């Protein structure tokens, strides 16, 4: 890493384990604000289990965790936070969703590590610790530079996620030739991709060239016409890579539409956002040669195995992030002799956890993600 840091913490869970357990001293109290009932209860319980794994791994009695059900409600989330705050808790993991951060700015000397992947910085005591669009675009930009890719277009859905992608592009100064927006309705996707790739023009080019050859005196025209009749389109594309800012079935629809419009992933780089190693991509024809940033796969797989071994369940991807946050809070509190960590998160910090490496500065988190490719029905690491 080439940045010069005034003050750097660089650590991992192995280093955390080298810190001797405390016999006395002020407790490090962490509040957990989670949906432990209702439609998102399984997600909340998965995070709670993950935090318990981290607590057991660190094994220091100075570390205490106080789970509270926030009922996935902004009002009840604040009441739960206030109750813990009044008992001395000043650092919280949660809430999971941004909608529940309402009124937390009132507890201005506390820190809330929300698991949301938003980029917005609305409150001085809220830290967004999810894998946000900025982190993903940062990794994509690194890949573009590595491969010397210069003519990149970006496809962004007309959805609530639109603003986040735009912020990610702006913050990273990634070189984008042109941004295209699209309606996520399946019936509209192919039509939009045809417009973006100028499919009708390229298709007409084939017919025009065949007609030209038929009327020419070219001695090899029959052979050339035979070759052209096997082509669907003719003419170069004005881009060498495409960033598809989507997931799941919409992502698959777009890659399929690109291939349908004679845009081959063997000639054009298909790049997307963090897919969390969605295995349905492995057997999808349109997903072969698809590139994406993500957390460290080996660590993710190891964590999933450990989680399953302990709970006979597989973890939610959000719970993977929460595991690291416990270690981060513990280290910062121990090394600064304080659990009042509001100002600690202002410092430049490089943290190495299970998810990979991420930087903290001015209460912002940027994950330094790995990069992967779907190739031969496997996830291949690029860097």
Image: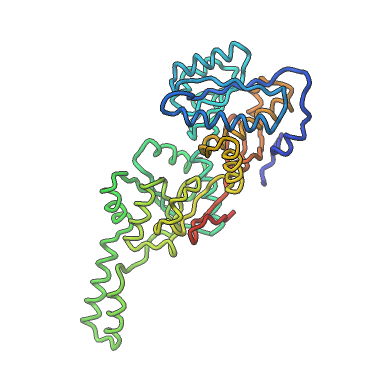
The answer to whether 345 is drawn above or below residue 293 in the figure is above
Q: Place residue 259 in its image quadrant.
A: bottom left
The answer to whether 208 is drawn above or below residue 375 in the figure is below
The answer to whether 55 is drawn above or below residue 286 in the figure is above
Residues 150 and 193: in front is: 193
Q: Place residue 335 in its image quadrant.
A: top right
As drawn, is 131 to the left or to the right of 152?
right
Residue found at the far top of this picture: 86
Q: Which residue is drawn at 66% across and 38% down?
A: 350
Residues 119 and 67: in front is: 67
Please provide percent x and percent y for residue 266. Answer: 44, 64
Residues 108 and 167: in front is: 108
Q: Which residue is drawn at 27% across and 71% down?
A: 206
Q: Place residue 380 in its image quadrant.
A: bottom right
Q: Residue at x 59, y 29 (%)?
A: 363
Q: Residue at x 30, y 50 (%)?
A: 189
Identify the colour scheme used. rainbow
How many numbered callouts?
0
Please provide percent x and percent y for residue 127. Answer: 55, 28
Please provide percent x and percent y for residue 274. Answer: 49, 45
As drawn, is 198 to the left or to the right of 55?
left
The answer to whether 190 is drawn above or below residue 40 in the figure is below
């Amino acid at each position: 890493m080439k940045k010069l840091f005034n003050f750097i913490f660089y650590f991992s869970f192995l280093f955390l384990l080298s810190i001797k357990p405390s016999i006395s001293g002020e407790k490090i109290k962490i509040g957990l604000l989670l949906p432990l009932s209702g439609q998102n209860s399984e997600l909340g319980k998965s995070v709670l289990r993950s935090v318990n794994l981290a607590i057991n791994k660190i094994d220091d009695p100075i570390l205490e965790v106080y789970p509270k059900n926030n009922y996935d409600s902004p009002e009840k989330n604040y009441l739960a936070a206030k109750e813990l705050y009044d008992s001395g808790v000043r650092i919280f993991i949660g809430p999971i969703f941004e909608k529940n951060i309402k009124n937390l700015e009132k507890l201005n000397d506390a820190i809330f590590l929300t698991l949301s992947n938003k980029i917005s910085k609305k409150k001085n005591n809220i830290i967004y610790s999810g894998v946000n669009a900025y982190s993903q675009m940062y990794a994509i930009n690194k890949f573009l530079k590595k491969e010397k890719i210069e003519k990149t277009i970006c496809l962004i859905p007309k959805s609530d996620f639109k603003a986040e992608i735009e912020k990610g592009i702006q913050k990273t100064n990634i070189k984008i030739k042109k941004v295209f927006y699209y309606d996520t309705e399946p019936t509209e996707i192919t039509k939009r991709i045809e417009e973006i790739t100028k499919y009708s023009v390229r298709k007409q080019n084939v017919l025009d060239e065949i007609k030209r050859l038929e009327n020419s005196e070219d001695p090899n025209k029959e052979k050339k016409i035979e070759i052209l009749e096997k082509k669907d389109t003719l003419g170069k594309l004005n881009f060498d890579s495409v960033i598809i800012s989507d997931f799941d079935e919409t992502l698959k629809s777009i890659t399929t539409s690109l291939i349908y419009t004679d845009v081959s992933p063997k000639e054009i780089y298909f790049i997307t956002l963090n897919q969390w190693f969605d295995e349905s991509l492995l057997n999808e024809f349109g997903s072969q040669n698809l590139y994406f940033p993500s957390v460290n796969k080996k660590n993710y797989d190891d964590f999933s195995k450990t989680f399953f071994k302990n709970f006979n369940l597989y973890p939610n991807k959000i719970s993977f992030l929460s595991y690291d946050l416990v270690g981060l809070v513990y280290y910062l509190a121990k090394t600064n002799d304080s659990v009042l960590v509001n100002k600690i998160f202002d410092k430049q910090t490089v943290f190495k956890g299970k998810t990979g490496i991420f930087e903290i500065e001015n209460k912002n988190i940027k994950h330094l993600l790995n990069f992967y490719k779907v190739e031969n029905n496997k996830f291949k690491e690029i860097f």
